[in-house]
Structures are given as C-alpha cells and as structure tokens.
C-alpha cells in the first residue's frame, strides 16, 4: 500500500486495517522493554526495575476541548499527548509508553490522521515515549482522541496531591495566562493573530501546543524535592483548590508573585480584563504547582537550576487555615473560582 | 451530595466533579497494590512481582458498536469491560486494573451513567479487576465508552498471535454464532425476542453481555499450554486469518467441528442463512482461538478440565501452506471473509 494518498481520501475509504498499517509505519522502532508492540491483542511491556506504574488517561473531544478551525491536526496529536504527559509529570513519574484511542468521523481526511499521529509521535520522540498499541473506531459524531499514558516512579518518590503540609512553599513552573489569552484570541478570530503580532502568536502557540513539564516532573520524582504536586490543566485557581482540599489545608497566594505571561498580560489589559484574575482562572497552561517544604529548599533549588530555562516561581504557601487567600496590593480576597469543564 | 437522583437529572446537570464523586462512591475498596487510586493526577500501581505488564484499549461508540435501543446501560458497562478483558485473556494475561474514559452526551440521564458504571463494576468484581482512574468529558455527539485494561503475565508465558507452528491444533472456546444471531434478532426487533422464546433470549444475552474467557486465558498464561492465541471479537474467519498471517502460516478448519451455538443454528436455518458461514463470519462472540502443539496436549487437556464447563473444541490445524481452507462435507473451500468494522 502506498504511503502517499490521493487527494480527498478519507479514513472511511481506507478502513481499519489500512489505517493501523499507516500508523504502524510512522512509529519508530520500539525500545527493547517493549516485548510486544502494535499489532497483537495487547501490548506487553517490561516494567522498569524497582518502580511503580503510574497510569493516566485523557481524551480531547472536538467541539468541547478543541475546534478544528483553531488547531491543526498536528497540534491535536501534540496536545492530546501533552495533557497526559503533564499528568504523569505531576506525579513525579517518567513517562514510558502510551496507547491511543481514535474515534474518527468517516469523512476525516486520511492525510489529517497522518498529521495527528505525526504531531503526537514528534512530542513522544522528544520524551522517549513509545506508542505501543491502540484502537481505531469510526463515528458519526465528533473526532475523539484518547490516550492512556503509563510512566514509572520509585515508591517513595510519588508526588500525590495530598502530601502537602502547613508552611510548605507553593511553586509554579512557567508562566500563566498565555493559553487562556491565546484561546480568547482564537475565539475572536480563528485564523489567529496577524503575522506581525508576535506577542499573541506566542500565546496562541501556548494554547495549541502546551509543553508538558516532563523534565521537571522526572527530576522531582527522582530527588524527593517536594511534598505534593498537581498540574494546572484547568488553571491555578482550580489546581490550588484541589491540592489544598486533598491536603485538608488552605493557602495564601501572593498576587504580585504570580508569573503572568507578559504577552497575555498585555492582551488582558487591552481587552479590559484584570490580568491577575484572568491568569489565575484561565486553564490549558499545563504547568505544575508544587508544594515544597522549607527543609527541601536546597534540593528544589538544584532542580530549578536543571530546569533548562523554564522559570519556577514561588507564589505562596500552604496554611492550616483552609481558606484560599489571594493577597493583592488592594488587600486579601478569596481566590477566584476555577473553570469546570463539564458544565456548559 | 445525595446518592439518589431526582427524576430527569442529566450528567450535564451534575458536572464533572459530582460525576466523579458518584462513580468513586460506587467503587469497592482497592486492593493493596493500588498505591494511589481515583482522584489524583494519575493512578499509582505496584506491578505484580516477576511479571510483564499487558496493556490493551478498546472503545465502544454509540451508533457503531451499539444502539442504546438494543442494549441497556448496564449491558454497556459490562460489554466495554468484557471486550478489553477478552484481549488480555488472548495474551494469557491475568487482568489487574482498568482506567475508564467516558465521553457523555450532556443529555444522558445521570441514573444511566450509574448503571453503566455498575454494569462494569459487577464484571470487574467477578474477575478482581480494580477501577483505578479515568476521565469524564461531555460531548455533543454519541456516547463513547473507552477502557484501557492492564494485566500481568510471566515473561515466557505471553501468548502472542505469532507463536503458532505448522501442525499446531486449533482450539476454540465456547460456541460461535450466538452473538451474531442475537444482534440480527435485535436489529429486526429492538425489544428483543418474545418472552417465551428462550432460545433467542440466550443469543441476545450473548450479544449484550459477552463473557470474556478470563479464567481460561489466565490458565493458558500460567501453564505454557499453547503457542499462540487471539480473541474472536470480529469472528472466527477474521481471527484465524490474523493469527495465521502473524504466524506466516495457513490453516485447515473442519466445518463439522465448528461449535455452532444450537439456538443460533436454529435461527440461521429459519432465516435462510447457512449456519456454518454465519457462525464463522459473525463477530462479537469474544471466544478464544488457541494454537496448541501436540506436545502440549496433556497440559491443554488439564486446562479444559479446569474450564468450569466452558466447552473447548478442536476445529482444525495450522498448515505450512498459507491458504485458509474450510473443509465441509461438500468439499474444501476458502474460509469466508470476516467482518471489518471500520468500512461502512
């Protein structure tokens, strides 16, 4: 079967077996711990020695998590994997392999499916994640991309949400608000920002291709440098609320310390939104929120040095009092509510 | 939050957090090898000592794999898990845990989601499979239920599709054609067979609630009693073709030996279909096809004795010649084509 496609060929034209073949040919040789990969009833994997399996699943649905007008097929493949790798990073786990669930409208261009797979495999290659199996289904409904990702972490290095203690410092990776500004910009104009507008282009890229904090998660998991972590898929407000709740604690966040993306800040300002509130409530940044005891500060500082230019910023601390306080120049107030995906 | 629901409450009314809570409360206590279960960024699992991880994913899509008119919500939960456990059984693996991906129309009754989860958990409980995590998403499209299942098998006990040798006997569990007859019957009358028609009721039950051959798969994986195996999700013709192809072999199947479900045979006869062809081509039976070398016959006979009443029937053998031959009283012919899901 040729790997080039006649124009207009849809996934429905090719059928399941041909689609699996197409995908299989795009996948690089598997690492030697993949005993049986794509093409059998199930994949067989040798566990990493002395580690626990860390497993997560996340699915992106057309019309809910993305519009095909806003994001390319390659972005989609990237993003579906990124959100899963972000969850593993938030457990301190090193990602190892994924299985893929594709629910495809029969009218989808087969070339677009290639791009989805390539977008995913490019990110997978960067983090040495193996695609070991999956499933393809047709659908009369929207495109649904699901990934289940498995990573490894040593037993006493797991970073749950619940391990935080009062007085632990709260640190956040990267910057916040970029993806929210990028999405808002795309919602106004699906074509994206004008070519000259490099500021907004960064925010849009942030939204379309979030960078999961795999390296930092792996370093955290190897070095016992934190008590707890969570990824900020639904924003800082939501993530902090969930982490604090799991710890039965509260938190104080210093509004001035929150690392707001500079381009996003400019966009929020120009559009009459309070940058701090928008950045704290906005989702899709896929940064990590980490609770670090003072006793681990040195080890954590070593991780910051190894983070290859990703800023890691202290934004507050966990408190015995279960309130969630945002400290601003105008005084203390309650952290704004996060965003709940499901409710429409 | 009360666990009883006011009439008419939809999953969209409840929202993601409340739905996860509802599911969480239905899940029995996790085994002690589940270090972190539902409610964190990912689940953390202790691998079974000395085994490999076996991972599979399968997704059922409304309008493609099922119609809600034909199958109840509880059936759906059962079936989605069953098809995954069947894949693990076909690798000789003992199932351990699953993660769940739910893509729900916002209009779905919350009570139906409870039934889906309960249907799944009932089957999971019977096979000691732990639900350790998952993901819920709303959708404007059809209901999509995805499961990724992980099992364990010892290294030299993995049953791939590719291990068969010329002369290996082909054995099949259970009976064939029941699910196909059940589906055909439901397609004529979604209400199902009349109350007095216990024959067809069995076929319909077979279609709605396939019984994955977990015990036999586990026994095969523990006892090195076979060279290769595959599950017959898409029928014997399709499964045998795939197994033979993976082995670079062919096969001869004795048509008279094929264990056709007696009620299905009656239905096929009454409806002008050749029972053998219908049973061989029909999917959804989720039986196992196993290639057993003569040297393992004793060990395999021991497994048959331990199969708790599930018939296991010899239907033919693998051949050097790559043809796929169906031997009937009327002479030899090529095995009919199987069913390919994707093409519409």
Image: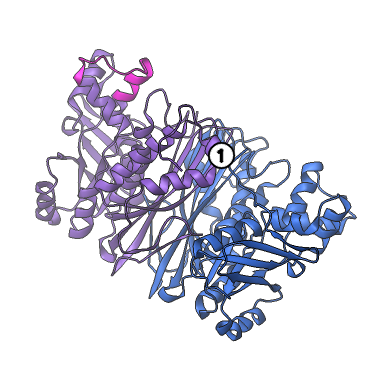
Chain colours: A blue, B purple
Left or right, residue B261 beside residue A263? left
Q: Is A124 on the left or on the right of B174, as rendered?
A: right
> Dividing the picture into quarters, in which one does residue B15 lie?
top right
Query: Is residue A14 among the parts visible in the rendering?
Result: no
Q: Chain of mark 1?
A: B
Q: Is residue B172 visible?
A: yes
Q: Quadrant of residue B239?
A: top left
Viewer-nearest residue: A213 or A39: A213
The residue segment tinted magenta is B182-198
Direction from residue A254 to residue A84 in the image, left or right: left
Q: Which residue occupies 66% across, 71% down?
A: A316
Residue B299 is situated, as x and y percent measured from the top left of the image, at 12, 55
Per the image, is B184 magenta?
yes
- Above or below, B150 against A230 in this view is above
The residue at the point 77 percent across, 59 percent down is: A276
Total tally of numbered discs in the picture: 1
- Name the residue beneath numbered marker 1: B138
Q: Quadrant of residue B157?
A: bottom left
Assess disc 1: are there few (<14), some (14-19) or many (≥20) residues with their C-alpha within 10 Å of its C-alpha. Answer: many
Badge 1 marks a residue whose secondary structure is strand
Which is nearer the eye, A40 or A340?
A340
| Residue sitting at x 66%, y 82% | A305
- Give x and y (percent) for residue B275: 24, 23
Give x and y (percent) for residue A2: 58, 45
The percent coordinates of residue A223 (x first, y second) are 52, 80
User: Is residue B266 magenta-colored?
Assistant: no
């Amino acid at each position: 079967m040729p790997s080039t496609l006649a124009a207009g060929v849809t996934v429905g034209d090719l059928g399941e077996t041909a689609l699996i073949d197409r995908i299989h040919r795009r996948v690089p040789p598997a690492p030697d711990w993949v005993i049986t990969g794509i093409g059998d009833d199930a994949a067989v994997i040798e566990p990493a020695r002395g580690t626990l399996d860390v497993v997560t699943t996340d699915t992106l649905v057309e019309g809910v998590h993305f519009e095909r007008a806003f994001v390319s097929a390659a972005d989609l493949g990237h993003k579906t994997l990124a959100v899963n790798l972000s969850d593993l990073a938030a457990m301190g786990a090193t990602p190892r392999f994924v299985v893929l669930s594709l629910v495809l409208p029969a009218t989808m261009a087969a070339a677009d499916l290639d791009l989805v797979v390539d977008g995913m495999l490019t990110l997978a290659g960067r983090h040495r994640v193996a695609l070991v199996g999956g499933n393809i289904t047709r659908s009369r409904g929207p495109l649904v991309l699901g990934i289940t990702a498995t990573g490894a972490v040593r037993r006493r290095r797991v970073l749950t949400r619940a391990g935080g203690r009062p007085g632990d410092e709260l640190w956040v990776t990267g910057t916040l608000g970029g993806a929210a500004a990028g999405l808002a910009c795309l919602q106004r104009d699906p074509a994206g920002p004008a070519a000259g507008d490099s500021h907004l282009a960064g925010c849009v890229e942030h939204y379309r291709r979030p960078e999961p904090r795999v390296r930092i998660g792996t370093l955290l998991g190897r070095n016992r440098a934190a008590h707890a972590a969570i990824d900020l898929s639904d924003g800082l407000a939501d993530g902090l609320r969930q982490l604090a709740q799991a710890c039965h604690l509260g938190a104080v966040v210093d509004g001035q310390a929150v690392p707001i993306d500079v381009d996003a800040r400019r966009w929020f300002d120009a559009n009459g939104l309070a940058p701090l509130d928008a950045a704290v409530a906005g989702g899709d940044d896929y940064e990590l929120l980490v609770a670090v005891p003072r006793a681990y500060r040195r080890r954590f500082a070593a991780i910051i040095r190894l983070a290859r230019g990703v800023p890691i910023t202290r934004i507050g601390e966990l408190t015995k009092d279960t309130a969630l306080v945002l400290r601003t120049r105008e005084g203390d107030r309650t952290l704004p509510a996060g965003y709940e995906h499901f409710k429409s």
